[in-house]
Image (cartoon, rainbow, N blue to C red):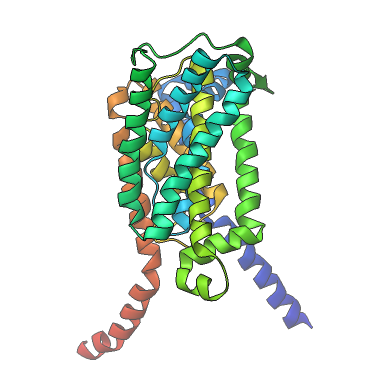
């Protein structure tokens, strides 16, 4: 009886240690370390309104990355999100300037634009078997070109953009709830929805299974091609939503919004623990990694680092994240090799 209780206690202790050793715990510590370091460099960084206000600058990365996570879990890649942000912004602006429709109806049409872009890309990836990297790279140029063409047809100068949006549209990104920007609240809500969809539904299990083995998913009766197509639709809608938030926050619509978001988005997803080979990932990890990257970029800019150099640490984080994941994945093989070689080494001695 005593031995059984002891074993149960050891199992509970091991479970607690495993929870503490989760990758998400490391990301939380990384965020806290960033706050301490950048606060020491520039004390203004620690002011609540400054720290909370920083979320306005990287909400787009946070929103898009949680939906790109679905794509990478299926074993795909999505580098077109930045172009969809710019296209969505300019579609919103041109329809508003030329049609006179209700702004919130235009917002719905803009989200549908992102869904259509994602559906087109997803169809090519799922049904033509063309590598997702090639498809999304091509679609990135395609959607960026569409945005510039729309601007030209509407006879609007790209550097000026489209402004004069109604106050009801530009005001919602200036709201605060408990000191937190409304954009951050939107991100948290979307992250919770994405978490429930991926980790609490049958659809989420299908997404994971498609990433682990698409052929096995097909044999199990899962329509894997439709599942793969659907994750690109979600990603496209997320990018459009980010474009809407960015347009509201800045009060103008431009075709070049999002052009610098691709690297931070992919880094956030990979740093959050999602495998680039598919079949593994969490929304919580991606959300925390996106915040870590955003805080790092904001902290570096407040420390006097020029904005043109902010991609250097992000690229470094991406390399480190992939390296650590690869090392942890091969740790079992390294241990097995060591134990096999150990008897031979002992005999030599």
Which residue occupies 53% across, 66% down?
Answer: 209
Which residue occupies 20% across, 88% down?
Answer: 348
Q: Is residue 289 visible?
A: no
Residue 275: x and y, percent? 43, 58
* Res. 175 image quadrant: top right
In the orientation shown, which residue stands out farthest toward the left?
Answer: 348
Which residue occupies 47% across, 25% down?
Answer: 91
In the orientation shown, which residue stands out farthest toward the top?
Answer: 164
Residue 53: x and y, percent? 54, 21
* Res. 256 image quadrant: top left
Residue 345: x and y, percent? 24, 85
Residue 11: x and y, percent? 66, 71
In the image, residue 149 sits, relative to residue 222, either above or below, namely above
- Position of the N terminus by quadrant: bottom right
Please name whichever residue, 337 or 6, is drawn nearer the observer in this view of the structure: 337
Please name whichever residue, 42 or 215, is drawn nearer the observer in this view of the structure: 215
- Position of the C terminus by quadrant: bottom left
Horizontally, is 325 left or right of 134 in the view?
right
Please name whichever residue, 346 or 256, is drawn nearer the observer in this view of the structure: 256
């Amino acid at each position: 009886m005593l031995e059984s209780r002891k074993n149960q206690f050891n199992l509970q202790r091991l479970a607690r240690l495993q929870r503490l050793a989760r990758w998400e715990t490391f990301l939380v510590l990384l965020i806290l370390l960033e706050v301490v370091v950048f606060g020491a460099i520039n004390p203004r960084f620690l002011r609540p309104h400054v720290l909370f206000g920083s979320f306005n600058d990287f909400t787009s990365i946070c929103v898009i990355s949680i939906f790109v996570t679905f794509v990478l879990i299926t074993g795909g890649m999505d580098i077109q999100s930045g172009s969809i942000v710019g296209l969505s912004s300019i579609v919103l602006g041109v329809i508003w300037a030329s049609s006179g429709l209700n702004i919130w109806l235009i917002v719905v049409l803009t989200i549908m634009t992102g869904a259509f872009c994602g559906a087109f890309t997803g169809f090519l990836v799922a049904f033509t078997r063309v590598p997702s990297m090639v498809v999304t790279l091509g679609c990135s140029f395609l959607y960026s070109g569409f945005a510039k063409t729309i601007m030209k047809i509407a006879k609007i100068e790209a550097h000026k953009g489209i402004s004069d949006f109604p106050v009801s549209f530009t005001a919602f990104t200036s709201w605060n709830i408990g000191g937190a920007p409304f954009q951050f609240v939107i991100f948290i809500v979307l992250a919770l929805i994405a978490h429930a969809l991926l980790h609490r539904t049958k659809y989420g299990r299908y997404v994971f299974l498609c990433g682990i083995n698409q052929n096995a998913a097909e044999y199990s009766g899962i329509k894997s091609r439709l599942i793969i197509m659907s994750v690109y639709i979600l990603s496209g809608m997320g990018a459009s939503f980010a474009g809407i938030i960015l347009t509201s926050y800045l009060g103008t619509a431009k075709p070049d919004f999002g052009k610098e978001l691709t690297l931070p988005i992919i880094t956030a997803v990979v740093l959050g623990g999602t495998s680039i080979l598919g079949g593994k990932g969490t929304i919580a990890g991606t959300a925390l990694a996106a915040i870590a990257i955003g805080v790092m970029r904001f902290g570096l800019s407040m420390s006097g680092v020029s904005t043109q150099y902010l991609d250097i640490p992000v690229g470094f984080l991406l390399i480190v994240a992939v390296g650590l994941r690869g090392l942890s994945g091969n740790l079992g093989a390294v241990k097995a090799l060591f134990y096999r070689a150990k008897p031979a080494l002992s005999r030599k001695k």
